Image (cartoon, rainbow, N blue to C red):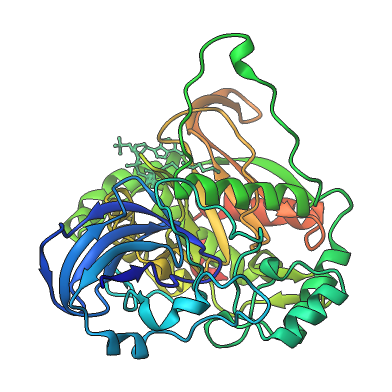
Amino acid sequence: MPTPVKLPALGENIDSADVVNVLVAPGETVAKDQPLLEVETGKASVEIPSPASGVVKDVLAKTGDTVAVGGTILTLEGADNTAAASAPPATDSTDEPAAAGNNADRILPAAQPQPTSSAAAKPLLAAEAQPRLSEVPEPGPSGRRLVPAAPTVRRFARQVGVEITEVRGSGPGGRISIDDVKAHAKRLLSAPAGSREPARELPDFTRWGDVELQPMSSIRKLTAQAMAYSWANVPQVTHHDLADITRLEELRQRYGPRVEAAGGKLTMTAILVKVVASALAVFPKFNASVDVAAQRIIRKLYINVGVAVDTDRGLLVPVIKNAGTKSIATIAAELVELATRARERKLSADELQGATFSVSNLGGIGGTGFDPIVNWPEAAVLGVSRAQMQPVWNSESFQPRLLLPLCVTYDHRLIDGADAARFLHWVCEALEEPILLSLE
Ligand code: CAO
């Protein structure tokens, strides 16, 4: 009897993945830990290794499919069933449909997935059986997702009116405790009215002409969720300023070859990451997060700057960790490397997490200004538009100066307008007089 191999848990809040590459074919003998599939888990590429050795019978997952965590990706013949024992424990199924639980002894969750680069993805429990793979995953027969939580916790969630599938578990493998349910309930109570309004139905667009239906990629889905969450939950304001970068541009041209020799490209983005990291040390509110449920502010004592990268799959924000301690040349080299791997789909989940502030530079593409959205749970984001030569009055005459439009969008619960004006003014001054960076 062939043994189904299931898509294993892939990380926090990831309940499905897009198949980008099927690495085995029916009839092929596979060894334990041999990669079976390459999937995109939200924003990172991950290889799914085989949980056991055996011969591939049917490959159910196809390139382009969206597979639910727990969904069958292929079946193996002659698989060593003892491998199941080393698989993550099955979800509590006492009061859930039997999909995963009843067959647990015959199902092989794939072994722990490997990001395609060295950093490891965080393992998570939860095995939701999804029989069919070629469509966007649906909830199980009862309409509910299987989640790792004890029956007492589920009962408590029902009693207080919390949907257990929406709770983020803090236990090992994402296991949900009663305290997690309470914290979730608190967050719901502090959410602004209207933020849980059910989605409205779309009109039938075919009444006005032909349409084409395209599935959303995992990046598009995550971006949509993150942006909608930020927009609905963070009261945000954007403050604008202009930096005179005429002299800085001369320096950039002069020292560019030196940085290129070190493997980087001395671009405005690399310089801005360094300047912003210095500004965050002076203005720690911009490096903090608001914890509404606990009514407190979390000040992060590290500075990690996310950089928005435009890729053919959509927006990715890899993170330059500890940017304040790095030289501009190091940041420039890291940025080239991260942006290249982002475009080649080779970033690990770890490289996309942990930012304390983000920079979004659209200046290489064009535009005189834009208002970015705060990348929650960060408190602020710097938006950069295209630098242009403009006539500037110096009390006697107009002089041609290269002006860089900058803006900062900030969480107004934490940061006041005056803070934002001071922060951006500091950034502008540092760009105009780089020596200030070494004075503060
Ligand atoms: N003003 C004028 N010129 C700029 C500029 C700016 N603000 N920013 C970049 N440029 C120029 C660069 O100097 C470079 O010119 P040269 O080739 O003549 O040197 C050119 O534009 C291309 O820059 P780049 O893209 O190679 O390098 P970068 O470091 O400036 O940008 C990155 C890197 C990853 C930020 C960029 O490639 C990118 O993806 N930008 C889009 C980010 C995005 O989508 N943001 C929106 C997110 S939603 O908020």
Q: Between residues 425 and 221, which one lies in front from this camera angle?
A: 221
Which quarter holds ligand 1? top left
Q: Is residue 152 above or below residue 74?
A: below
Please tell me in which quadrant of the rendered image residue 346 appears.
Answer: bottom left
Q: Position of residue 90 (x, y in %)?
A: 50, 82
Determine the residue positioned at 75% across, 87% down. 152
Determine the residue positioned at 26% across, 51% down. 344
Q: Position of residue 112 (x, y in %)?
A: 34, 78
Q: Position of residue 123 (x, y in %)?
A: 44, 79
Q: Between residues 89 and 432, which one lies in front from this camera angle?
A: 89
Residue 125 appears in the picture as rendered: no
Q: Is residue 182 above or below residue 270?
A: below
Q: Residue furthest top?
A: 208
User: How many discs mark residues in the rendered view?
Assistant: 0
**Quarter of the picture holding the C terminus:** bottom right
Determine the residue positioned at 31% across, 48% down. 343
Q: Between residues 137 and 294, which one lies in front from this camera angle?
A: 137
Q: Is residue 221 above or below residue 11?
A: above
**Quarter of the picture holding the N terminus:** bottom left
Residue 348 appears in the picture as rendered: yes
Please tell me in which quadrant of the rendered image residue 121 appears.
Answer: bottom left
Q: Is residue 81 above or below residue 426?
A: below
Q: Position of residue 12 (x, y in %)?
A: 53, 71
Determine the residue positioned at 45% across, 72% down. 9
Q: Is residue 335 left or right of residue 269?
A: left
Q: Is residue 63 left or right of residue 71?
A: left
Q: Between residues 24 and 321, which one lies in front from this camera angle?
A: 24
